Amino acid sequence: MKETVIETKDLLKKYRGRAAVENLNLNIRKGEIYGFLGPNGAGKTTTIRMLLGLITPTSGRIEVFGQDLRKHKLQILRKVGSLVESPSYYGHLSAVDNLEAIRRILGAPKSRIAEVLDIVSLTGEEKRPVKGFSLGMKQRLGIAAALLGEPELLILDEPTNGLDPSGIQEIRGLIKRLPQEQGITVVVSSHLLSEIEQMADTVGIIRQGQMVYQDSITNLQRQAGGEMRLAVSDPEAALRLAEERGYTGILQDQKLVFSRMIDARVALLVKALVENGHAIYRVEERRQSLEDFFLQVVGGEES
Amino acid sequence: MMWRALSADWLKIRGKGLWFLVFLGPLGLVAMQGLNFGLRYDYLREQYSADLWGGLLNNVAAFVPIALFLGGTLVCSLIANVEHQMSSWKQLLALPISRTSVFMAKLVLCLVLVAVSCLLLSVGTVGLGLVLGFKVELIPYLDVLRIGFMSYIAALPVIALQLWLSLANRNQTLPVALGITLSLVSIFSMLLSEWVPLTWPYMAWESSHRLLFSGAGLLLGLLILLPGALHFARKDVD
């Protein structure tokens, strides 16, 4: 099993008696991209602020790199780079000076500024005041700032929020590259499943402050897998035959409906039906989109 | 740690009008007295004939407390605003640096900037005196330094309070409004009890127990810093 980078136990944060985050148990392993998913206001940012020590949990424990965040905050933060919500920057300063202000606190070598500017492709723009930058450039500057201290863990809160498609693509590519090239663990939050689906290895879904789903993205895709539908000449008899062969299915709108199965089993079933004189009109696979699955998980208890 | 934060802050205040303010305050006071003495030169020269330098210093000193309160308020607010403006607190405080260091760096920056103002006031006053033809041999160096700095130390409680409020509130209306109110009230220092800290910068120049008032200011200032720093270190950053 891989090393755990972030682990939270029964994390709770209350604002005026209302729990913004409740019973949250995160488990993030080294080298993965962890997608933190949830609708707006679900508690993603609150959780991330707690992970960075910006706000204190009402109760519960946070361990990062196996150390208690409360006791070893500065040691931990030295290895963490972060970008929280809207970009933070000093508008009157140039990109280089913005990074320099952070570099002075980190004590990183001066040459690192040019390196991170290169990583986020801001080279050539570094002397302009940042207030004239586009949102995408500001966001990239924020990522450059997060990378300045050569972190082992990168925490990005809604890094693509408000960007245009090409900006989103650029940031997404950047995030995917980091774990491969530099072995960095990345936590990235978003309210868009499609975003997370294209980047993350593991996904955690949070809803009203509670974790409702945490698994690998492949398992998520499998669970959202969908079904096989067969239209045949005599559905009742066909279903009986299928059940004799060990398939579990139901009858819906005069069609046989099975849960998703591997190709070989589909072939065997079709063969058995044909051999027993059934005419097969259609064999179709219907996939439930992840978006539907997400809505199901997120909105489940309300409906 | 604190020095690192301070060196970063030094960079951040560039082009934010802080240096302009630091120069404007003392030079404004000196220019005002330049006008005062320039317009009624003969009259004032006769009135202060016994101690020309003392007369000039007294005239300048009358406006030092209000300038300190106003200047301190604005410097604190502008320093805090550098971080408030683009919500940079979350970025700054997620860096591996203790909140106490960040707070101390802001405090030292604020104190240094006001100290530069005080120094400029002393230099400017001597300059004005010389322009008015007062004798070089008679310059009361100690009093010249005292004019800014003793009152400055006595004004520390208000500066500490302003720093706390400015750092704690994203909205600067409250701290700035309070600072201006305090400055205006301080004009009536001679009418207030000497137990009111607002009168201390005035007393630190005027009273026969000057050191007492500066000392009290230093003490109360430190006392107010404590809860300010503690609050800053504990608060949730949004």
Image: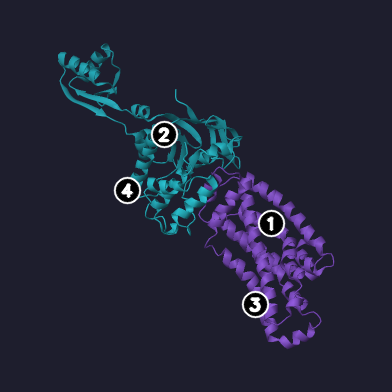
At label 4, the amino acid type is: Ser
Is residue A256 placed above or below B82 in the rendered structure?
A: above
Residue to which mark 1 is pinned? B161
Q: CA distance from mark 2 to mark 4?
A: 25 Å
Query: Is A114 in front, or is A99?
Result: A114
Q: Nearer the viewer, residue A115 or A249?
A: A115
Query: Which residue is located at x 75 percent, y 85 percent?
Result: B45
Which structural element holds mark 2? loop
- Which residue is label 3 attached to? B31
User: Closer to us: mark 3 or mark 4?
Assistant: 3
Q: Would you name the residue on which mark 2 appears? A: A183
A252 with respect to A296 (left or right): left
Q: Amino acid at mark 3?
A: Ala
Residue A286 appears at what percent x and percent y?
Answer: 27, 29
Give the farthest residue toward the right: B208
Pointer 3 with pointer 1, Cβ within 8 A = no
User: Does residue B132 show up?
Assistant: yes
Task: Please give the name of the residue rendered at 63% of the width and 73% of the height, measured from the top-left corner.
Answer: B27
Contact between marks 4 and 1 (CB within 8 A): the answer is no
Chain for numbered disc 4: A
Q: Amino acid at mark 1?
A: Leu
Tell me which numbered mark, 3 or 1, is placed earlier along the sequence. Answer: 3
**What chain is colored purple?**
B
Tell me where residue B153 appears, x and y as whole percent: 73, 61
Q: Between disc 2 and disc 4, whose residue precedes?
A: 4
Report in which chain the residue with disc 2 lies.
A
* Residue that label 4 marks: A166
